[in-house]
Image (cartoon, grey):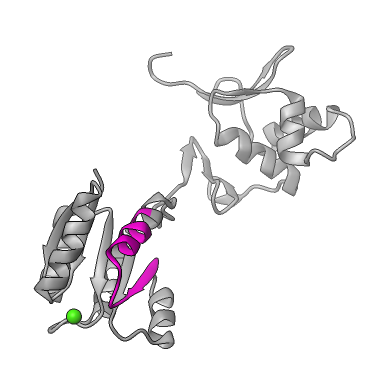
Amino acid sequence: MSKVLIVEDEPTISRVLTAYLTKNGLHVEQVFTGRDALEMFFRSRPDLVLLDVMLPDVDGWSILSDIRKKSSCPVIMLTALGEIDHRLKGFEGGADDYISKPFIGEEVVARVKAVLRRPIPTVEDHTLQYGSLRIDPVGHTILYEGEEVELSPKDRSLFLFLVQHPNQTFSRDQLLDHVWGFDYDGSDRAVDLSIKRIRKALRLSKDDPYAIKTLRGLGYQWRVQTKET
Ligand code: CA
């Protein structure tokens, strides 16, 4: 069950929001001041925050900014002002959506659910480490002992594709489609040559617990040995 934290100083509004969200299968926690908001946020780790802009102590924007320093948790701003510059301020500050008051309960529920369905962009580290290799599939970088590995864009894409699907076998045709595109009409020998260049550039050896394996008649695989195998 997704958990929503409501930060709203007006008890009536908070109660109405809670009623709608609870009725729609969401778990709700309420706080009524900015100070409690941050404390509760880091303690209860909600899946989404409904954050009022006008609070008696700390304003919603600075709470948003404090949340964004440490988390990519979705935040929907509640604003009574309905002014366009506040809306923009919200998006620039990292808000995922805004709802202007007065609101319709069903609309709040729909927006909350829509935001919860979005994939969350994380600020976390996605890099993978294999021996001397450090790979960041998101940033498209491949480092060997801290030095950028020289690879053509296609070779790089092919390798990153394989790495993101460990222990899955892909045929040459599949790799051509994924990396070169459907309109590529060259030979599938392009894949073999690319794999050869990648192995060389990345100094991949057969003795490592990770390697690009050739599976005869099937294709290629980024094989990562786990302790059990
Ligand atoms: Ca308020």
- Which quadrant of the render holds ligand 1? bottom left
Q: Residue at x 26, y 79 (%)?
A: 53
Question: Is-magenta flag for residue 104?
Answer: yes
Q: Which residue is drawn at 47% across and 41% down?
A: 128
**Residue 57 pos. (x, y %):** 13, 83
Residue 39 at least partly seen: no
Q: Identify the image quadrant of the C terminus.
A: top left
Residue 161 at least partly seen: yes
Classify residue 12 by image quadrant.
bottom left
Q: In this view, does 187 lie above or below 25?
A: above
Q: In this view, does 206 lie above or below 154?
A: above
**Residue 25 pos. (x, y %):** 23, 46
**Residue 163 pos. (x, y %):** 57, 35
Q: Which residue is drawn at 43% across and 52% down?
A: 118
Q: In this view, does 138 lie to the left or right of 109?
A: right
In front of the other: 102 or 71: 102
Q: In this view, does 158 lie to the left or right of 193?
A: left
In front of the other: 164 or 57: 57
**Residue 1 pos. (x, y %):** 24, 43
Q: Is residue 174 above or below residue 134?
A: above
Q: Is residue 22 above or below residue 83?
A: above
Q: Is residue 112 left or right of residue 171?
A: left
In front of the other: 19 or 215: 19
Question: Is-magenta flag for residue 41?
Answer: no
Q: Which residue is drawn at 90% across and 34% down?
A: 186
Q: In this view, does 135 lie to the left or right of 80?
A: right
Magenta highlight range? 95-113
In front of the other: 37 or 29: 29
